[in-house]
Image: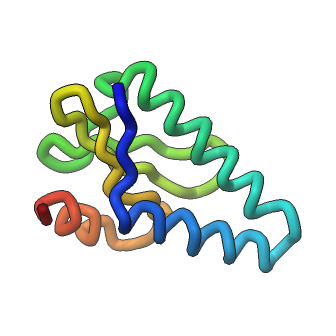
Amino acid sequence: MILVLRREAEADILEAFRWYESKRPGLGHAFVDAVDDAFERVAEAPSSFPVAYRDLRRLVLRRFPYVVYFRVVEDNIQVFGVMHGRRDHRVMHRRSVLP
């Protein structure tokens, strides 16, 4: 399957990278590695992750308190966001209904 990052998801990752990197050099790179690992897990078995909202699924990162939100559409996996676990997840619900 092809993994497609929406623009908002890219912005989420960059924002978190910068925040972690400002706290400790190298930590931002560790965050990106954790996100990459999550993407690999999603690509291997997307239907193994729980549904968060309608057909939007979620995966909680192993090391960081972030959640990857994605949807399977035909042969693509669309990633809508990578959000901190304490943020209001209704934001993700709104993102998932936008074209």
Asked where in the image residue 80 lies, by quadrant, the reply is bottom left
Q: Quadrant of the N terminus?
A: top left
Q: Quadrant of the C terminus?
A: bottom left
Asked where in the image residue 82 lies, by quadrant, the reply is bottom left
Q: Residue at x 59, y 42 (%)?
A: 36
Expressed as whole percent of the image width and height from the top left, the position of residue 28 reads 74, 63
Q: Residue at x 47, y 63 (%)?
A: 10
Above/below status of 95 relative to 53: below
Q: Residue at x 57, y 74 (%)?
A: 15
Asked where in the image residue 97 lies, by quadrant, the reply is bottom left
Horizontal relation, residue 59 to residue 95: left or right = right
Please state which of residues 38 and 87 is positioned toward the viewer in this rendering.
Answer: 38
**Residue placed furthest toward the right:** 25
Expressed as whole percent of the image width and height from the top left, the position of residue 73 reads 18, 35
Above/below status of 52 relative to 7: above
Please state which of residues 23 and 76 is positioned toward the viewer in this rendering.
Answer: 76
- Judging from the image, the colouring scheme is rainbow
Horizontal relation, residue 44 to residue 79: left or right = right
Above/below status of 68 relative to 77: below
Expressed as whole percent of the image width and height from the top left, the position of residue 53 reads 18, 49
Expressed as whole percent of the image width and height from the top left, the position of residue 96 reads 19, 58
Q: For the image shown, how many numbered marks are present on the structure?
A: 0
Q: Residue at x 58, y 69 (%)?
A: 14
